[in-house]
């Protein structure tokens, strides 16, 4: 049985929620999968964001954000707390973006940061 934490460390914009729900349906994501949000070492600024659908692990905290189950490793919280995942659709850029108040430096690609 999963414990769902009610305090949300991150937020999902309305646009991101619409796109995530579209992806869940289009890709036939299994019901027991959740949206994994995290970080990994690497990228041009030190860390890269992780965003994808995955199964829960023993290291994960579980959050329900705007109707989407989110998995995040507890250790990643210090890098991600307060972050907003957004969806941008413009002439030069289309995709998910990460608005992270913990990032002290980021690169032009928008998927790498330093904290």
Image (cartoon, grey):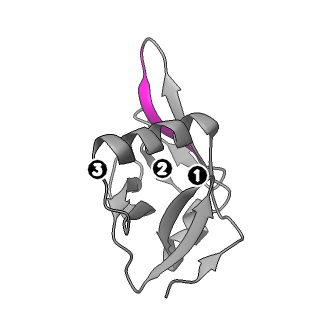
- Between 65 and 72, the one lying in front of the other is 65
Stretch in magenta: 92-99
Q: Is residue 86 above or below residue 104?
A: above
Residue 33: image quadrant is bottom left
Q: Tell which circle, 1 or 2, labels the residue nearer the N-terminal end.
A: 1
User: Residue at position x 50%, y 70% from top?
Assistant: 76
Q: Which residue is mark 3?
A: 28
Residue 112: x %, y % from top left: 42, 47
Marker disc for residue 103:
1
Residue 4: x %, y % from top left: 60, 77
Q: Are marks 1 and 2 in contact (CB under 8 Å)?
A: yes
User: Residue at position x 56%, y 64% from top?
Assistant: 79
Q: Tell which circle, 1 or 3, labels the residue nearer the N-terminal end.
A: 3
Q: Is residue 97 above or below residue 78?
A: above
Residue closest to the far left? 27
Marker disc for residue 113:
2
Residue 36: x %, y % from top left: 42, 62
User: Residue at position x 42%, y 32% from top?
Assistant: 95
Q: Tell which circle, 3 or 2, labels the residue nearer the N-terminal end.
A: 3
**How many other residues sit within 10 Å of disc 2, few (<14), some (14-19) or many (≥20)?**
many
The quadrant of the rendering that contains the C terminus is bottom right
Residue 54: image quadrant is bottom left
Kindly tell me whether residue 97 is visible in this rendering: yes
């Amino acid at each position: 049985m999963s414990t769902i934490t009610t305090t949300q460390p991150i937020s999902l914009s309305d646009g991101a929620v619409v796109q995530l729900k579209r992806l869940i349906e289009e890709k036939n994501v299994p019901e027991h999968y959740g949206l994994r949000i995290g970080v990994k070492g690497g990228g041009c600024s030190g860390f890269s964001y992780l965003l994808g659908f995955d199964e829960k692990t023993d290291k994960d905290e579980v959050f329900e954000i705007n109707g989407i189950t989110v998995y995040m490793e507890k250790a990643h919280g210090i890098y991600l707390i307060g972050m907003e995942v957004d969806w941008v659709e413009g002439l030069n850029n289309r995709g998910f973006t990460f608005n992270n108040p913990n990032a002290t430096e980021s690169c032009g690609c928008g998927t790498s940061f330093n904290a």
